[in-house]
């Protein structure tokens, strides 16, 4: 079954907006999230497929409302959360 | 993302996550700084442009690049390995008959080592949804009006496989040296939303 991220061919997302002279990151926290993810992948805490899966399992409304690195943050948090009883 | 307040809340959330992972011994401040530094200093479309310029002046290199792009990168001291998982790399050449353009409809897969950090538009739902359905219209919005006779191939990349476009060498550049040729190549040209 297609997940919310599978947007290829869908209508209604509007025109493509290009930000001129866009910086690599729009806030320091975005760079930190990027680095945390690379570090966890490197250490084998999880792999790239698990990372993508964690993003793609976000509730659709939450996924669409989140910025790119907010999705990354969600995934790193979810994949490194201390195991709880319902985990 | 709704303004300053939401952003500072997110920043605080990231700090808590970072502290938790550092306390758990899974990373360190130094490692995180190093990762960001290497990304910002090393990953750049200038790398992709070097590959293109070499392919333009050296037909044998072009042939090797199209046959096995991972190996051809190594010849120039470049590599796709930005993480623990190997990525198959393919270079797709534009011709007068065929124009190539890249997308990752499912997420944001992109050859960062060769093109630098990806632009937000590449990761947007608008680009990912539309470029596979009406590529000619999307490219026109980028200012690239292709002749009606030129076919468009859209390459949907994945986590295991990345692509880069080899643009056509512009006319009137016969006398240019390799460095000058590389300087003509843009990030958008390597994605396929521009001609060069």
Image (cartoon, coloured by chain):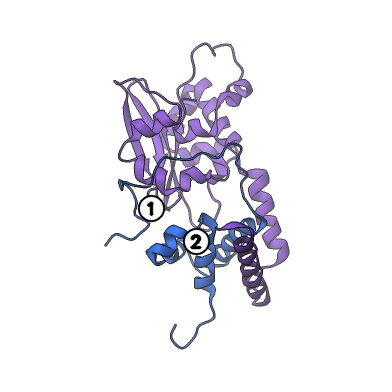
Task: Judge from the rendering whether residue B32 lies leftward or rightward of residue A64; answer left or right.
Answer: right
Q: Which residue matches tag 2?
A: A71
Q: Which color was chain B given?
A: purple
Marks 1 and 2: in contact by CB < 8 Å? no
Q: Looking at this view, is A51 or A12 the one in front?
A: A12
| Res A40 seen here | yes
Of residues A84 and B9, the one nearer the viewer is B9
**A66 sits left or right of B148 in the view:** right
**Is B156 left or right of B167, judged from the image as shown?**
left
Label 2 sits on a secondary structure element that is helix
> Which residue does the numbered mark 1 point to in the structure image?
B106
Q: Chain of mark 1?
A: B
Q: Quadrant of the N terminus of chain B?
A: bottom right
The residue depicted at 54 percent of the width and 34 percent of the height is: B187
Please provide percent x and percent y for residue A63.
Answer: 43, 61
Q: Does any portion of residue B79 appear in the rendered image?
A: no
Residue at the image position 50 percent from the left and 68 percent from the top: A46
Q: Colour of chain A?
A: blue
Q: Residue at x 53, y 58 (%)?
A: B84
Q: Quadrant of residue A42?
A: bottom right
- Name above or below for residue B103 compared with residue A42: above
Q: Describe the element under mark 1 as helix, strand or loop.
A: loop
Question: Where is residue A56, by image quadrant?
Answer: bottom left
* Vertical side of A12 occupied by A51: above or below: below
- Give the crowd class for mark 1: few <14, some 14-19, many >=20 residues within 10 Å: many
Q: Is residue B30 left or right of residue B195?
A: right
């Amino acid at each position: 079954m297609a997940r919310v991220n599978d947007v290829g061919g869908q209508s209604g997302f509007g025109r493509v907006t290009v930000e001129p002279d866009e910086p690599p990151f729009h806030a320091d926290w975005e760079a930190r999230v990027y680095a945390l993810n690379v570090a966890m992948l490197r250490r084998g805490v999880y792999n790239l497929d698990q990372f993508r899966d964690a993003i793609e399992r976000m509730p659709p409304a939450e996924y669409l409302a989140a910025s790119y690195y907010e999705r990354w943050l969600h995934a790193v948090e979810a994949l490194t959360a201390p195991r709880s009883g319902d985990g | 993302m709704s303004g300053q307040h939401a952003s500072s809340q997110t920043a605080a959330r990231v700090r808590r996550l970072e502290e938790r992972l550092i306390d758990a011994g899974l990373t360190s401040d130094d490692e995180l700084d190093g990762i960001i530094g290497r990304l910002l200093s090393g990953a750049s479309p200038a790398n992709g442009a070097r590959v293109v310029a070499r392919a333009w002046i050296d037909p044998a290199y072009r042939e090797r690049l199209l046959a096995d792009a991972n190996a051809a990168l190594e010849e120039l001291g470049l590599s796709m390995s930005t993480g623990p998982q190997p990525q198959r790399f393919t270079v797709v050449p534009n011709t007068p008959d065929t124009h190539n353009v890249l997308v990752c409809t499912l997420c944001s897969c992109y050859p960062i080592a060769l093109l630098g950090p990806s632009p937000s538009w590449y990761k947007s739902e608008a680009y990912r949804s539309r470029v596979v359905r009406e590529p000619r219209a999307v490219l026109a919005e980028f200012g690239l009006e292709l002749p009606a006779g030129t076919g468009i191939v859209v390459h949907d990349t994945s986590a295991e496989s990345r692509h880069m476009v080899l643009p056509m060498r512009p006319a009137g550049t016969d006398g240019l040296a390799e460095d000058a040729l590389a300087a003509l190549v843009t990030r958008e040209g390597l994605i396929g939303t521009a001609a060069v």
